[in-house]
């Protein structure tokens, strides 16, 4: 609980990284149609 109050940006940072990973996967899948 203390961590959440002290570093609320930590959660948003993690979410942003997850979104970036998803975008990278999308780009890779579009660039490599054979994979899908």
Image (cartoon, rainbow, N blue to C red):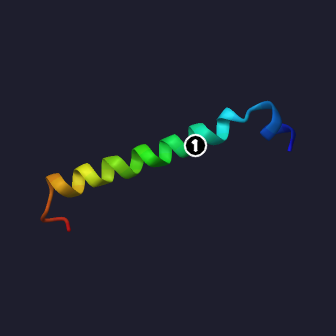
Q: Is residue 6 above or below residue 20?
A: above
Placement of the C terminus among the 4 image quadrants: bottom left
The location of residue 9, given as percent across then percent down, is 66, 33
Instruction: Give percent across and percent down for residue 21.
Output: 40, 48
Going 39% across and 52% down the picture, which residue do you hit? 22
Question: Left or right of 28: which side holds 14?
Answer: right
Image point (12%, 65%), residue name? 34
Residue placed farthest to the right in the image? 2
Residue identified by numbered label 1: 14
Using the rendered view, name the quadrant where residue 33 is placed. Answer: bottom left
Residue 6 position (above or below residue 29)? above
10 lies left or right of 4: left
Side (left or right) of 25 relative to 6: left
Q: Quadrant of residue 3?
A: top right
Find residue 4 and report its horizontal and vertical position in percent: 78, 40
Rendered location of residue 25, percent (x, y): 31, 53
Residue furthest to the bottom: 36
At a point 15% along the width and 52% down the height, the residue shown is 31
């Amino acid at each position: 609980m203390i961590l959440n109050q002290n570093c609320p940006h930590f959660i948003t940072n993690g979410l942003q990284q997850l979104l970036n990973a998803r975008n990278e996967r999308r780009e890779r899948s579009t660039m490599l149609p054979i994979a899908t």
